[in-house]
Amino acid sequence: MSARTLRQIVGLVPSLTAGATLPAAKTALVLIDYQHEYRSGPLALPDEASVTPIACRLRAWAEASGIAVIHVLHRAPAGALLFGAGSPGAEPLAGLVPAAGETVIYKQLPSAFTGTELAEVLQAKGSENLLVAGYMTHNCVDSTAREAFHRGYKVAVVADASATRDLPGPGGATIAAAQLHAGVLAGLGDRIAEIVDLATLQALRVV
């Protein structure tokens, strides 16, 4: 018997499939931590060079579709080893710099909700559906998606616009970034979120 998710077991039907309708006014795209710390240095992601362009296309699709774009940036105190305020590593990646009029949320913890005004912003926008993408899959994307689900949002994680890095595993063996990415997405897809890619979103009917 093939493996099934909890969503499948209880009969939840995917809502984000080709031709399905997505209401733009009730949807927000949350772009998490597309910052230079993930391009070079100790947090450099092996797939960043190929994933960031997809994130740029995802942003462009959302903007063209009338979907609210919310940028979440990690910002530590000035002088911190990573993401220090004003440091080059804390700067947004090219193509993902917030534009005038787009919402910017600054966080200091993995979840974009914790210690920020994200919940209030989403409530003011009337958002019910959240599309989540960013760096890193196992940390800030996972934390934000789970808290969004717990707060009652319908959550989708954009797999090909997200990425992570190699991590040490039990016994010292390295867990490759691609394996970790897939495992985290499988966990989220079991109950928390629909797992989609950019092509799936582009095939939706956004109204």
Image (cartoon, helix red, strand yellow):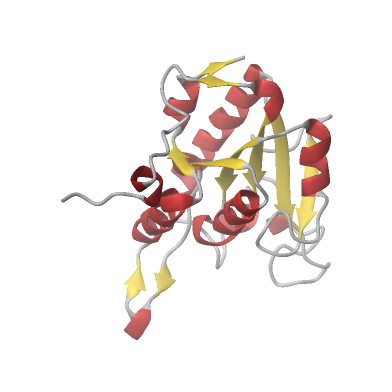
Judge left or right: residue 8 versus residue 121. left
Q: Is residue 83 above or below residue 58?
A: below
Horizontal and vertical percent position of residue 167: 43, 70
Specify the farthest residue to the front.
10
Tell me the residue at 38%/53% (across/down).
Answer: 186
Q: Quadrant of the C terminus?
A: top right
Question: Can residue 91 be seen at all in this image of the molecule?
Answer: no
Tell me the residue at 45%/43% (across/down).
Answer: 159
Residue 104 appears in which quarter of the rendering?
top right
Tell me the residue at 41%/55% (across/down).
Answer: 181
Residue 196 appears in which quarter of the rendering?
top left
Q: Is residue 190 above or below residue 207?
A: below
Closest to the observer, 192 or 180: 192
Closest to the observer, 168 or 154: 154
Closest to the observer, 55 or 89: 55
Q: Is residue 99 above or below residue 180?
A: above
Judge left or right: residue 14 versus residue 150. left
Horizontal and vertical percent position of residue 6: 38, 51
Judge left or right: residue 154 versus residue 116. left
Q: How many marks?
A: 0
Horizontal and vertical percent position of residue 86: 82, 57
Judge left or right: residue 1 versus residue 5. left
Question: Can residue 118 be seen at all in this image of the molecule?
Answer: yes
Tell me the residue at 70%/54% (across/down).
Answer: 112
